[in-house]
Amino acid sequence: MFARDALSTAVETACDPDPAVDTISTIEAGNNHTYRVTLADGTDLFLKVGTRFPDAFPAEPATMRRVRAETDLPVPRVHGTGTDPLEYPYAVYEYVPDCEAEWAGDLSHEAAERLCREAGRHLCELHQITFPQFGRIGLDTDASADDTLVADAPDADALTVVDPTPFDDLLRQSLDRQVTELADSPFDTRRDSLEAFGTDLIDRSDFADVTPALVHGDYRLGNLCVDPSAEQITAAVLDWELPTALDPLWDAVMAQSLLTAGHRLDPDSRQTLRRAFWEAYGTSTADTPRRRCYELLARIRLARHLDTECRGLSEAARRARITDHHEAFDALLVDR
């Protein structure tokens, strides 16, 4: 989509001092256009062009700057941002190599446990960044008359909730969307009961004392760079494209599920990893309608990605994973 000369100019424009670009290679990942840029001195950079949500994209580098400034999360450095000459917003980040593990079960048990402890600590820190309202986070800037995209992302202090929405409405929207996506899946016959149970849990949950916090929303191995040989296994936390202010417990439950409920882990390992996560994170408000609501949403999310999870596996492994999800749904619904 973008010519090599235009990409090179974008990097040179965004970075200070102007770097000498040697090579640019496409990275086949995600929903935006991404590139690995190698400079003449051997330094690698990561160029991300916000083609998916151009209007919202400038909030990503601003969020990363704020997280780097206010927490110890390993977030890649933002070298620069811009729009020219690509006519889409883009950011140039520090490039962080990755071992390319997809699931916690791809790591040794010791490495997976360290990963989960770090995840708990990271999210506990992240959730100290709070906002006065729930909803999507963007930049508090006045739109220009012709809606031209701003060339450089404003300071991280400009982040604000730009689309305030009652949290129970956000949960209902998520429940409806995810249950709908179970249609024509092995879990199709459960859709009515899952939606009814989820709606009941939302109705019985108390959000009055919940402080909206910055959440990651997709804290999983696919959005992490990890180095199992390093003292800190998590080298970088990626994908801050759609920053949102939500209940921090929702983010914690979702991350714990994505990291510890994978099909390549045995039950004992899952329990150990869950314990490691919550010991590091802190409070978990177990056995409340609010907590169970988030556990239900997390399991539905895993179930609707069955095909992605089981890609390349045997039919027997796929059937076993389907059974795993059904048993998890049964456990959640048991005292409905």
Image (cartoon, rainbow, N blue to C red):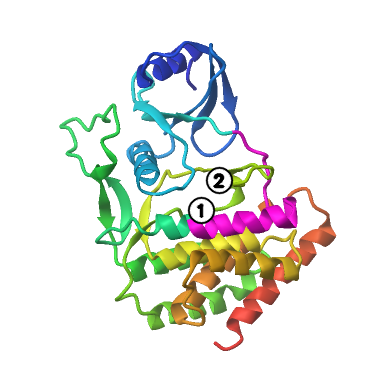
Identify the secondary structure beneath mark 1: loop
Of residue 144 and residue 282, the one placed in the foreground of this image is 282
Residue 236 in picture, x, y percent from top left: 53, 42
Residue at figure coordinates x 59%, y 82% from the top left: 333
Residue farthest toward the front in the current orientation of the protein: 231
- Which residue type carries mark 1? Asp
Say which residue appears at 40% left-offset and 83% top-offset: 204
Of the 4 image quadrants, the one containing the C terminus is bottom right
Task: Judge whether 84 appears above or below 187 on screen.
Answer: above
Query: Residues in magenta?
Result: 97-121
**Amino acid type, mark 2:** Asn
Task: Identify the disc placed on residue 223.
Answer: 2
Q: Which residue is mark 1?
A: 218
Q: Give percent across and percent down for residue 43.
A: 54, 20
Residues at marks 1 and 2 touching, judged by CB atoms closer than 8 Å: yes
Looking at this view, is 141 or 99 the one in front? 99
323 versus 48 height, above or below: below
Q: CA distance from mark 1 to mark 2?
A: 7 Å
- Left-right relation of 327 to 206: right
Residue 165 lies in the magenta-colored region: no
Instruction: Specify whether residue 193 is in view.
Output: yes
Residue 98: which quarter of the image?
top right
x and y, in percent, of residue 154 in the image = 26, 35
Prevalent SS, magenta region? helix
User: Are there few (<14), some (14-19), or many (20+) residues within 10 Å of tag 1?
Assistant: some
Q: Look at the picture and state if 280 lies above or below 115.
A: below
Judged left or right of residue 33, residue 16 is: left
